[in-house]
Image (cartoon, coloured by chain):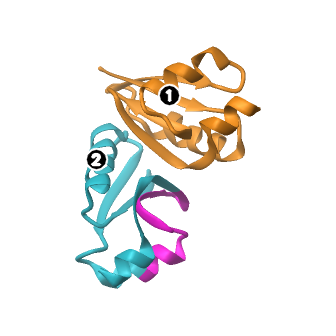
Chain colours: A orange, B cyan
Amino acid sequence: MSKAVFYHAGCPVCVDAEQMVLGYLDKTKVDAKIVHLGTDRGRIEEAEKVGVKSVPALVIDGNVYHINFGASLEDVKKG
Amino acid sequence: MSKAVFYHAGCPVCVDAEQMVLGYLDKTKVDAKIVHLGTDRGRIEEAEKVGVKSVPALVIDGNVYHINFGASLEDVKKG
């Protein structure tokens, strides 16, 4: 089972991408957790460490997939 | 069953994203086709019409998800 984390910040682009992640990822292969960096700000550093540059981003087994573009992590920090 | 098309152009970023699409999308929910715009150039116009701006991009039921950034369609046209 692969480990996945979907980082987002509640922006409209993030919500669209979350639909794709929750709706279409194969739950028999991927255990996906959702992290809202706008409210769970203590995890921004963790996101940066794994290579997340912007949200929404999906990290599967250490591979980072930035999906469309909602906000940079720098903007999330200011928010 | 949702219809999905993954547009790419063979770039390294595209190959990484293709792994995610082929490996983790739920095949019971999504019928995913792969289109290589570098070799199947006649479909560049179709990609533009559905809203693809860069590759790799995954289009599911009309929703466009640009994944990371490999190349703009303008660059694919030049190539």
Residue at the image position 50 percent from the left and 20 percent from the top: A46
Residue identified by numbered label 1 = A48
Disc 1 residue type (three-letter): Glu
Q: Is residue B46 magenta?
A: yes
Q: Nearer the viewer, residue B24 or A51?
A: A51
Q: Is residue B48 magenta?
A: yes
- Front tag of 1 and 2: 1
For residue B41, above or below residue A3 = below
Q: Position of residue A1 (x, y in %)?
A: 29, 20
Q: Is residue A59 left or right of residue A2?
A: right
Residue at the image position 45 percent from the left and 73 percent from the top: B47
Tag shown at residue B16: 2
Q: Which residues are magenta?
A: B45-64
Q: Position of residue A51 (x, y in %)?
A: 43, 33
Q: CA distance from mark 1 to mark 2?
A: 20 Å
Q: Position of residue B48 (x, y in %)?
A: 50, 76
Q: Position of residue A20 (x, y in %)?
A: 52, 43
Binning the other alpha carbons within 10 Å of mark 2 as few (below 14), some (14 to 19) or many (20 upward) gives: some
